[in-house]
Amino acid sequence: MSRRSPTVLVAAEEELTRERYRAALDGGPYDVVATGVLDEVLATAKRASVAAVAGRVRSRSHRALLETLTERAPGCALVSLGGERPPTAPHDAHLGAPVAPDDLRATVDHLATRAVYFERLDAFVAAARRATTTDHSRLAQLRDETRTLQGSFDTTDFEAAFRLVDVS
């Protein structure tokens, strides 16, 4: 299994907003892509681990964009940024305005770690299914990695795992 860095998408029509959030996330253990082009948002979200949505993008309102990403990129965790109250659209986290850079980094770090956990768990399950022909040390390594990653989880993280199972 390849060890790729998680991708974090920052989606906002306003360039200054995008760049402020992108800059806050730079230096993290993930690749950050910031765009205000709807087609790029949709394409990137399909391979991203986390999408931070900070307002509208072209013809899609903040709420409509969250709903679209939920449908088209079900494996991507969603962070709603800004606004005084969380939108009713589905999301994994909401950070109200003004968004503190440390809060954004902590939230994205947590959701990116959760995404890595899901990848490792998938690899562990696949290796366990092939247990008679697989390298048992690889199986043990994957088991240890998943246990280490889940140490910081709460009930919402496990609920998210079951939502992904329901989608599949």
Image (spheres, rainbow, N blue to C red):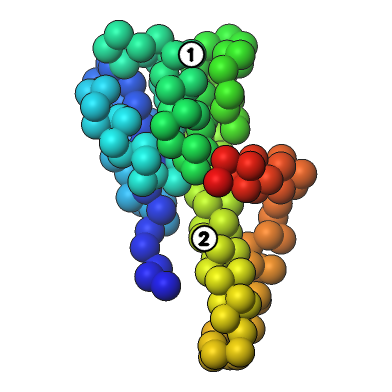
Classify mark 2: helix, strand or loop.
helix
Question: Is residue 87 placed above or below 32 in the rendered structure?
Answer: above
Question: Relative to residue 150, is residue 79 drawn left or right?
Answer: left
Question: Is residue 163 placed above or below 113 in the rendered structure?
Answer: above
* Residue pictured at 61% horizontal, 76% vertical: 129
* Residue pictured at 27% horizontal, 12% vertical: 58
At which x and y percent is residue 17? 33, 21
At which x and y percent is residue 159? 71, 42
Residue for badge 1: 63
Residue for badge 2: 119
Residue 60 seen anywhere in this rendered image of the structure: yes
Q: Nearer the viewer, residue 164 or 90?
A: 164
At which x and y percent is residue 65? 41, 19
Q: Amino acid at mark 2?
A: Glu
Classify mark 1: helix, strand or loop.
helix
Disc with the residue nearer the chain's start (2 vs 1): 1
Q: Amino acid at mark 1?
A: Arg
**Residue 25 falls in which quadrant of the image?**
top left
Residue 92 disc label: none
Residue 106 seen anywhere in this rendered image of the structure: no
